[in-house]
């Protein structure tokens, strides 16, 4: 693995946009990898074809179902981890992934927090997954080994077309 390797977790709507941007920024780099769930969906082949065209490597795992130890072994050795899995992965996944990243000794981590600023919303909102995002922030704030960055873009969605 290259010294400046990046692993993007997920290639859904947000993930593929991030992957395309990173690949365009350095089209000759072979340091970009995406972690995908194994899939038999026919659309998966089109995604794999695009990733190959972009010179993006693929590794397989399931951050929702795999244990923290398995996820940690998958992310170990990458310089930067960018999570693009969103809420669809289910409760507990965001904090499990953050713990796995820290256990793996990853240098830089961008957790999935692209939507709203959870610190502003605070705990106890009607959306219980928002509290989990605050748990991720608390975990990251109490350590100093992994650099991390929250990117709050404001609410985004594609179903209001």
Image: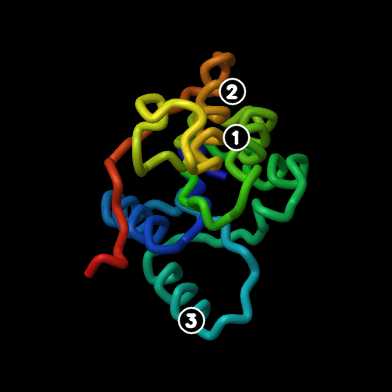
Q: Local crowd at mark 2 within 10 Å, few (<14), some, or many (≥20)?
A: some
| Residues at marks 3 and 1 touching, judged by CB atoms closer than 8 Å | no
Q: Quadrant of the N terminus?
A: top right
Q: Which mark is residue 114?
A: none
Q: Quadrant of the C terminus?
A: bottom left
Q: Secondary structure at mark 3?
A: helix
Residue 96's spot in the image, x, y percent?
Answer: 66, 39
Residue 5 visible (yes or no): no
Q: Residue under circle 3?
A: 43
Nearest to the observer: residue 95 or residue 108: 95
Please tell me which of labels 3 and 1 falls first in the chain: 3
Q: Which mark is residue 139?
A: 2
Q: Local crowd at mark 1 within 10 Å, few (<14), some, or many (≥20)?
A: many
Give the number of the mark in front: 3 or 2: 2
Q: Residue under circle 1?
A: 98
CA–CA distance in space, label 3 to label 2: 36 Å
Q: Secondary structure at mark 1?
A: helix
Quarter of the image where one finds residue 110: top left
Q: Local crowd at mark 3 within 10 Å, few (<14), some, or many (≥20)?
A: few
| Residues at marks 2 and 1 touching, judged by CB atoms closer than 8 Å | yes
Residue 116 visible (yes or no): yes
Residue 52's spot in the image, x, y percent?
Answer: 45, 70
Look at 38% across and 30% down and name the residue there: 121
Quarter of the image where one finds residue 128: top right
Please tell me which of labels 2 and 1 falls first in the chain: 1
Q: Among all residues in the image, which is located at the extreme bottom?
A: 42
Q: Among all residues in the image, which is located at the extreme left?
A: 161
Apparent side of residue 70 relative to residue 159 in the rendered image (left or right): right
Residue 159's spot in the image, x, y percent?
Answer: 31, 67
Look at 65% across and 69% down and name the residue there: 38
CA–CA distance in space, label 2 to label 1: 8 Å
């Amino acid at each position: 693995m290259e010294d400046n390797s990046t692993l993007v977790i997920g290639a859904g709507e947000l993930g593929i946009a991030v992957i395309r941007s990173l690949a365009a920024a350095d089209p000759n780099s072979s340091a970009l990898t995406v972690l995908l769930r194994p899939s038999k969906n026919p659309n998966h082949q089109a995604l794999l074809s695009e990733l190959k065209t972009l010179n993006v490597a693929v590794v397989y795992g399931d951050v929702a179902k795999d244990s923290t130890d398995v996820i940690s072994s998958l992310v170990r050795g990458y310089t930067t981890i960018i999570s693009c899995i969103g809420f669809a992965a289910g409760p507990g996944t965001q904090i499990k992934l953050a713990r796995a990243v820290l256990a793996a000794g990853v240098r830089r981590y961008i957790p999935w927090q692209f939507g709203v600023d959870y610190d502003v919303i605070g705990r106890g909102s009607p959306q219980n997954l928002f509290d989990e995002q605050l748990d991720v922030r608390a975990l990251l704030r109490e350590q100093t080994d992994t650099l991390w960055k929250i990117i709050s873009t404001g609410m985004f969605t594609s179903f209001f077309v």
